[in-house]
């Protein structure tokens, strides 16, 4: 059994990690860390989880490496930056779910995360933990930075265009829609049920950090493949679920048939990306309700001749494929387990 | 009192018309028409309305002009096309809420509404009933075609750029989000609560008719002001409410301050368009929950230097400002009543 | 014009009062009070309201009586108790929306509101502001205590049995279901959208204060008419809306026909109570969605021979008929205005 | 591997069965039956499920017993009655999810299911498939009738009182609240999202069939333990989730401590029933959101001295513990597999 620690156990991503690890046949939870909620057990923090793991939240000790083979950080970016600096040399593997180490380029990082200083050189040691896109970099990796929830959907949506068809994307307009769990359990008036139930809330009409993350990753090694990335993000009256709509303007000629064929081929052998083809079912295009609770990302792409663009849609559950599920998937690859181990749950639909 | 008839009284827009007319001090409902539900009274059709108007649904008679000063058509486009052809010469004023006469250009109409043939020349006689944008064309008009719900939000959002600043809009990407009432009461499996509650549903990823309507209207008289209009539409888990996000690419230089000043000036004297300025309140940008049940359209515009675009947001209640409320507003102007008569209800928020 | 002050202007009930007063032809808002949010205007506090009344929140001055003919207290019960003690002798009319003065019996009050001490004798001077049930006590009243939202629905539901049929109610089991707006804007983790969206939450399985309020009122003057009142309350995933289900066990013989006839007769002349009869419409029994945004309370009663009981259902919008709307209705009667003045809005359905 | 057939594969319960069976290590789906949707594959019927099982819907053949060790009927009660009569002698095990064989008493059955005639004697051969309550009757059983979703929650809630404490329940008032998935995919206007989103809908204020089922089961062998059962049922704006509130009036003396102790003891060794104790966590009492997607039923009981009653709350996911999950649990026991096989998924919360 692989011994796993979770820091940030009281938050939503932390709870989801506990849930998934408890269902995983090869993982054993051996540490729960946090600076608040010390002494509380999972059942007290997460009302859905009623089992007793014999663990309660503890402050993070210096010798954590002796108790865990891998530690997952479900902490805010500034906390992650400090924890990584402190633990990187003694814990065999750290998987960070925050944005602290996602953007490799230091200047770009500083611009979008001015509140998250990080030690020189540390970011270069991180693998960007997008299991479908980073090939064989994950096995044995010591430091893994998980993509953001939106960045996961967007890069999975755009990768077949960039890496499969080799297109140059002149302008990408991204319109993201997501549920309230993305904001965690922080107490903000606008996140009260009374003010969120009826909302279609433009919470980031400009300036969403994940747009920089996407540019940084897709352009790595070969700058210029992706031009403008212009992103806006909206909160809708769901709890889980995220839909990324990517409107791609390119000078290349593509039709829907070519797109569909490319996507199917690109994701062959990747069980967690499902390419949806039109008019096939009751719900012909990606819709987050068809992936709820699962580690799937549903994608499709179509040519829009009237609009002069390619429409790419990618849907996922932001707490699973967008966070805890993708963390377990990356962990599986890191430890050379079959990618689907512990992640075979099918979507809960309708719900 | 102005005598008003409503055809299509059993549908959602019909019910909303009955509701608003019953609260209007200068209007008297004198006819309810429809081909189904004949004999039923408003209280039987619309559970919220319990009053007795002494009216029940009747088939449309040929002498309707003797009973009504104005007739509102809340009917599907093919039905509206037939009714207008039949009634145009005998009813003093017809206001059509459908898409049958929105697009003036015959070829464009035929392309987007192939199932709605219309008699030659009839479309030219219609005023496009956007009260804020058509100036003094409404008083005394005999035929009025109401803009679509999305088209209302989009044209109110873009008009200050086109008509106020005189910009040429190279490309406009529109991402629309709206509630389930837009689909009416038709029985479709995907519209059952069980399948819509958890959805962020890309119901028209390409090819939404309202994009053609917007192009047709904004370009009238001076083609070339608006280039590509590329629209996608999504259903979210609300009943009412519509948010149009317009991402505008233009070669002109504008900053947010200029945009805000322009919008405020453009809509001065137009009580139903509220320009929201950033960071002003709990909900700083247009969100449909802040207009629910009212005839307001909230708009804002901001420059996005990273994205190289202008972000325009417009929010409205699709059954009020997007349908029945705007119909009453146009009717008020048609009969030279103060524009706000019967439409003073403030938004129901939170709800 | 009647000059009206509102204290507690930043809360949900306060916002609803501002909304309704601004639509009322005979009222003029002349004072907004509160201990927090001082200096803020309505448009800053309530995103739906964008008009400028020329007022901002002020601390409550001692000479408030010179600026207002009536002051509405939308404050927590302990604050209301202090404000009433301070203002009762100088403000011509105080209408308190809190629970501070609802229960007349001092011992019963102390048991259910131990945190709300009140000066001796003050409670006896209050009229219980249930406009349909207190006859002619409202005109000219100096102190009015508004019923609680649940108490309004329950007493309107039970009154025809007690006062109309003269039944003795041996046991009344009440199951209440209501939306999140009842909890106001307080920041509690369980009220975040992420934790309330999926809930059917038994927030008061026993011990709801409104059960005592109902007993106290229905038994006034003639104790023994109502035996046990056993209440449980649940939060459902709505914002507005409240349904009170009352299961009445009595030794008297009644059938559904008698019940319906009694209810119709009892509420004749009371425009805000609508008696629904079975199988009449799409939604045959009271459902809060059919009263949303209006001041209606829909009620029905039926005999259940299998269950050996009477089932009474009462639905209302907790912010309108359950709070601000009923306050305006009571104010209308207090100042001898027609009861419906400013309250003619019809339900917003669907929404 | 146990070979499993599902009839009624296109419905919601059918889809949930396919989902759970596909995740079960000891079951192999070998037949999908139905009279409609013939030829369609699971991925076409259920948008969440994208795998190919090599199966499509077929009409039910006479030799089904040669292809399946067990067949699950997710069909309407009248269809189930016919299928059981046809297949009972050739299929080794039939598990019926409908109400056709739940009520053993013929007269009671006829009264509540007049539209479901059934052959003489067949009902007596059925085991009532409540795994926690029927002891060792399930292993080897040939005919199993699954309890209804409400009946499951109610009997699990009341059993410790009746069978554990031996109380006589004079009157039980049941108030049930449940989501829209209970109604399946039938097209009814009132089940459209637009009309259900805002509803707290009293769909069965009296006369719910499950009340008869509960009486029939709890009284078996020893009539008189349960007196009146008076049930009302409400639809709330969820898709999954069911909360049964049982208000129990008894002449016996019990306090909350005794109740809690009894419930914990009664359900020791039953992993799918979780007894919640007060004030323990963020969500101290049963709430369907804390069991979503899992096979758990959360229960609690407390004494209400003011109300003179016991309050029992039971929450479950109506498609899992209330239907497909309980079917798999019963199947596990029937084939002497560990009860939790294939059912270890933890609740998806928040969602």
Image (cartoon, coloured by chain):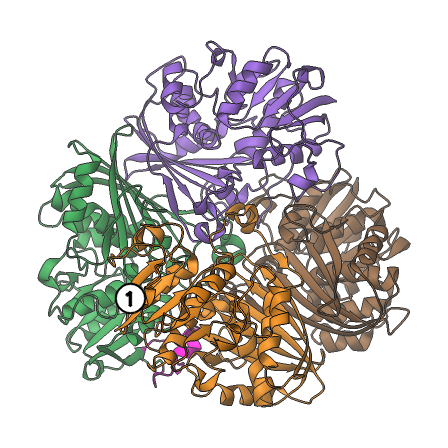
Chain colours: A green, B purple, C brown, D orange
Q: Is residue D127 above or below residue C324?
A: below
Residue A259 placement (x, y as % from top left): 19, 40
In the depicted view, which residue is nearer to us: A121 or D327? Answer: D327
Q: Residue at x 45, y 32 (%)?
A: B150
Measuring from the top left, give residue D313's x and y in whole percent: 57, 75
Q: Nearer the viewer, residue C11 or C112?
A: C112
Q: Chain of mark 1?
A: D
Q: Is residue A170 visible?
A: no
Residue A42 magenta: yes
Magenta segment: A33-56
Q: Which residue is more in the foreground, C284 or D253?
A: C284
Q: Quadrant of residue C128?
A: bottom right
A203 relative to D284 in the view: left or right: left
* Quarter-of-image position of residue C341: top right
Question: Does residue D1 belong to the magenta stretch?
Answer: no
Q: Is residue B66 visible?
A: yes
Where does the N terminus of chain B fall, quadrant-wise?
top right
Image location (x, y in percent) of residue C259 = 81, 58
Specify whether A187 is left or right of A9: right
Q: Which residue is mark 1?
A: D67
Q: Secondary structure at mark 1?
A: loop
Residue C124 in the figure: left or right of residue C208 = right
Q: Position of residue B86 (x, y in %)?
A: 57, 15
């Amino acid at each position: 059994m692989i011994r796993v620690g979770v820091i940030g156990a009281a938050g939503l991503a932390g709870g989801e990690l506990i849930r998934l690890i408890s269902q995983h046949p090869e993982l054993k939870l051996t540490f729960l860390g946090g600076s608040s909620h010390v002494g509380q057990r999972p059942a007290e923090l997460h009302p859905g989880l009623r089992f007793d793991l014999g663990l309660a939240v503890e402050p993070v000790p210096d010798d954590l490496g002796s108790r865990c083979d891998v530690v997952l950080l479900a902490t805010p970016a500034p906390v992650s930056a400090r924890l990584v600096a402190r633990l990187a040399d003694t814990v065999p593997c750290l998987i960070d779910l925050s944005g602290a180490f996602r953007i490799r380029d230091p200047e770009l990082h500083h611009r979008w995360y001015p509140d998250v200083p990080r030690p020189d050189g540390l970011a270069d040691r991180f693998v960007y933990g997008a299991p479908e896109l980073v090939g064989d970099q994950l096995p044995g990796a010591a430091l893994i930075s998980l993509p953001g929830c939106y960045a996961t959907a967007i890069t999975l949506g755009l990768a077949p265009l960039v890496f499969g068809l080799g297109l140059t994307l002149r302008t990408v307009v991204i319109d993201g829609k997501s549920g309230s769990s993305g904001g965690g359990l922080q107490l903000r008036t606008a996140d009260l049920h009374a003010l969120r139930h009826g909302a279609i809330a433009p919470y980031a009409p400009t300036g969403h950090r994940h747009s920089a993350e996407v540019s940084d990753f897709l352009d790595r090694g070969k700058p210029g493949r992706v031009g403008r990335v212009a992103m806006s993000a909206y909160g809708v009256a769901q709890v889980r679920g995220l839909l990324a709509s990517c409107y791609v303007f390119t000078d290349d000629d593509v039709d829907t048939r070519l797109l569909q064929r490319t996507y199917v081929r690109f994701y062959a052998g990747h069980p967690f990306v499902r390419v949806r083809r039109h008019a096939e079912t009751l719900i012909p295009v990606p819709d987050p309700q068809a992936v709820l609770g699962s580690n799937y990302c549903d994608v499709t792409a179509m040519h829009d001749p009237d609009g002069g663009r390619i429409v790419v849609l990618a849907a996922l559950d932001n707490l699973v494929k967008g966070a805890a599920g993708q963390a377990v998937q990356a962990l599986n690859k890191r430890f050379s387990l079959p990618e689907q181990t512990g992640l075979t749950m099918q979507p809960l639909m309708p719900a």
